[in-house]
Amino acid sequence: MVEAPAVAVELAELLAVVVGAGAASAVGVVLERFGLSAAAAGDLALAAWAVAMGLLALYVGVVALGYEQALPRLRRLAGGE
């Protein structure tokens, strides 16, 4: 049987990871949109930087935090492991 304080800590960690993943993904989307608008304005150096940073932020949000951190924690909580 899992104790209540351990579950509370797991839930707090899961919440922090999910919030971080959402924030990183949102920053990634904003940077991608900024990169597209910079490319349309003709500033290709700034556009390339913004698109690269946007892709990095999306990777961190979706893969590193979402898929590799949040999903296993959620499965562990749901399965009671």
Image: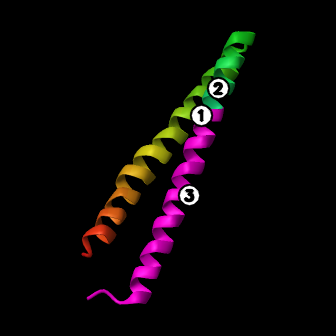
Residues at circles 2 and 1 in contact by the CB criterion of under 8 Å: yes
Residue type for callout 3: Val
Task: Name the residue tied to disc 1.
Answer: 29
Horizontally, residue 62 falls left or right of residue 79, namely right
Whether residue 12 is in magenta: the answer is yes
Horizontally, residue 41 falls left or right of residue 14, namely right
What is the count of numbered marks?
A: 3
Task: Name the residue tied to disc 2.
Answer: 33
Tell me which segment is drawn in magenta.
Answer: 1-30
Label 3 environment density (alpha carbons within 10 Å; few <14, some 14–19, many ≥20): some
Residue type for callout 1: Val
Task: Name the residue tied to disc 3.
Answer: 19
In the figure, 49 relative to 10: above or below? Answer: above
Horizontally, residue 4 falls left or right of residue 32, namely left
Tell me the SS state at disc 3.
helix
Q: Position of residue 19 (x, y in %)?
A: 56, 57
Foreground residue, 36 or 73?
73
